[in-house]
Image (spheres, rainbow, N blue to C red):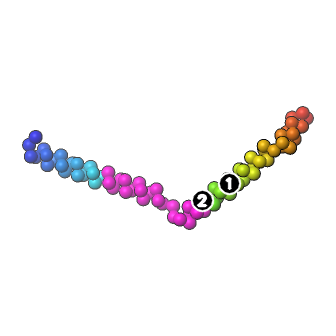
Amino acid sequence: MNLTAIIIVAICAGCLSSIISTLSNKKLKESNKFNQKERDDMLAQIQKMNERIETLERIVTDEKYNLNQQFADLK
């Protein structure tokens, strides 16, 4: 390899490294686009939904619910 080829490869490697660095920084900024209040609101909403799901699971797995469902099936 001559000196010109080495210089061209070094320049290309530097440019490629710069592009990769810029893209990774951009993705990092996009992943942090929710502020703390929005995150807290979403976590509170998820917690409320989990509580509702737990209540529904208790209702559906209750023996009385199953018995009522069997009566409804008989009608």
Q: Quadrant of the C terminus?
A: top right
- State which tag comes first along the sequence, 1 or 2: 2
Which residue appears farthest toward the top when viewing the image? 74
- Callout 1: SS: helix
Give the percent coordinates (x, y) of residue 30: 44, 57
Which span is picked out in magenta?
Answer: 20-42
Q: How far apart are marks 1 and 2 (CA)?
A: 11 Å
Residue 29 included in the magenta stretch of the image:
yes
Q: Does the magenta stretch include residue 25?
A: yes
- Residue drawn where x is 13% and y is 44% of the image: 5
In the image, 32: left or right of 55? left
21 to 40, vertically: above or below: above
Farthest residue, direction right: 75
Neighbourhood count class around disc 1 (C-alpha, 10 Å): few under 14, some 14–19, many 20 upward: few
Left or right for 61, reference 21: right
Image height of 56 relative to 37, above or below:
above
Report which quarter residue 65 is drawn in. top right
Residue, disc 1: 49
Identify the residue position indicated by label 2 in the image.
42
Rendered location of residue 70, percent (x, y) = 86, 36
Provide residue 7's location: percent of width, then percent of height.
Answer: 14, 49
Q: SS for tag 2?
A: helix
Residue at 83% x, 40% y is 66
Q: Measuring 60% from the left and 62% from the top, which residue is drawn there?
A: 41
* Residue for point 63% across, 56% down: 46
Q: Residues within 10 Å of mark 2 (few under 14, many from 20)?
A: few
In the displayed structure image, the side of residue 12 where residue 44 appears, left or right: right
Task: Report the label total.
Answer: 2
Q: What residue type is labelled 2?
A: Met
